[in-house]
Every structure is written in C-alpha cells, then in structure tokens.
Amino acid sequence: MMNSSPSACMELKEGTHVAKCVLMPGDPLRAKYIAEHYLENPVLFNDVRNMLGYTGTYEGKEVSVMGSGMGVPSLTLYVHELFNFFGVESVIRVGSAGALQDDVHVRDVVIAMSASTNSGCVGAYDLPGFPAPTADYGMLRRAVAAAEEMGVTADVGSVYTSDYFYHPDPEVNKKARALGLLAVEMETAGLYMTAMQNHKKALSILTISDHIFTGEALSATERQDSFHEMMEIALKTAVGE
C-alpha cells in the first residue's frame, strides 16, 4: 500500500508495501538482521534516514520489520505514520529491558500488559488525570500462549517507560520497583498510547538483558539466544493477526 499522505520520515520504494503487522526493534540494523534471519524473501521498503524497513513472510504470512529509534519521540513518529499513512493495523515492539524485581531474571521475556511512564506522551490527550497505556489483549493472550507452547519463561505485567537513560533522580528505579513494575525501558508507553489514539493494536515483548539492582547482565552469546526466544514469540503473535 502506498502512502496516501505526505510522510515526514518514510518513503516507500517503488513496488514495495508494508504488511498489516510490523515488528519494531529500536536499532535499524537489528531490523535488517531480523529480516535476513527470520523472514522469507525480505524486500527493503524504506531506508530514509537509514531507518531500515523490510517486508517478507513468516509461515506463509506477510510480516514487516522496521527500526523505531530510541525513545518515545522517535518511536511514536514512525508508529503514527505507519498507522495513518501505510495501512498498518498492529505493531509489536521487540527490544531489551532492565529488570527491577527479584523474580525477574536476565534471559526472561517480559510481555508488557501496560506501561507507567514519566514521558509527556500521556499528558497530550486532555483527559482529566492520566490515561493508562495498555496492550491489546488479543495480542497479549497470543504472545503468552506462544511462550507457554515454547516452554519460555515469560513475565507478564507492567513496565516503566522512561524518557531518561541516565535519570537525574538516583532513586527513580527504587520507586518503580516499589510499585511492582517488572522492568524499565524507553518506548512501550508511547507505542501503546499511539495505538490507543488511532484505534489500532500494539504489544511490547522485551528480553531482560540486565538487572538494575543485582548488576547481572547477559553475555553477547546469551543475548542472542534470548533474543531468538523473544523473536519467535513475536512472530507467532504477528501471524495470528
């Protein structure tokens, strides 16, 4: 599907299109890796600003993958355009996160039911109080079922989306931990709010790469193994759309 409105940061290459469901890692080179290692016959549809996007097939169904950049502002820009200009119906974030709770371990997959945040994205909707950025339940249910079928440990619950990688308050992670939030990352709340605004669907599936309080972290090899588990869950969820 060609875009029907001018796009600020995307331009489809001639003869290409975007699938109805898009997987979004932060790193565009990770999007390239996913396309080359998980999709059949991937075709590059966008490389504006080097934010690589590909469409291919998985188990016979079309799936796209595209980088989002880091943080809420970058991700929401691309997701808004995918939803409004390119016919996309659902987006699955695939990324890493830092564990906050003692029973969330490195290598675990976290499926984010909702996301608390310090981002201004929740204050833009003129709703008394604050909206609650929440995943699509159907996608959440399929992801949990896929993890169970694969025998993968998946922690399901709320995460904390921060606009700061280096937060000026040294106690902020302790506060998030005290609320029972499972992990901290930088995009999920923005994804969920953009999906809710546009009446589309979204889910965030995360791999725990390190633990904020214990200092435990995955090696490069362990990161790759855990990334594979997350990707299989995401792809099984995508083909169910």
Image: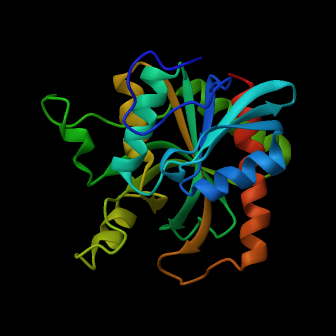
Q: Which residue is at 59% across, 65% downward? A: 104
Q: Is residue 52 left or right of residue 202?
A: right
What percent of the width, then of the height, locates residue 157? 51, 47
- State how many labels appear: 0
What percent of the width, then of the height, locates residue 137? 55, 27
Q: Is residue 204 left or right of residue 181?
A: right
Q: From the viewer's side, name the closer residue of 29 and 144.
A: 29
Residue 168 shows up from this direction? yes
Q: Is residue 77 above or below residue 215?
A: above
Q: Which residue is at 45% across, 59% downward? A: 185
Q: Which residue is at 36% across, 34% downward? A: 193
What percent of the width, then of the height, locates residue 74? 39, 49
What percent of the width, then of the height, locates residue 221? 79, 75
* Quarter of the picture holding the C terminus: top right
* Quarter of the picture holding the N terminus: top right
Residue 134 shows up from this direction? no
Q: From the viewer's side, name the closer residue of 128 and 38.
A: 38
**Quadrant of the rendered structure where residue 134 is?**
top left
Q: Is residue 199 above or below residue 191?
A: above
Q: Is residue 240 above or below residue 190?
A: above
Q: From the viewer's side, name the closer residue of 157 and 112.
A: 112
Q: Which residue is at 37% across, 70% downward? A: 165
The residue at the far front in this view is 14
How is the structure coloured here? Answer: rainbow
Q: Is residue 10 left or right of residue 116?
A: right
The residue at the far bottom in this view is 215
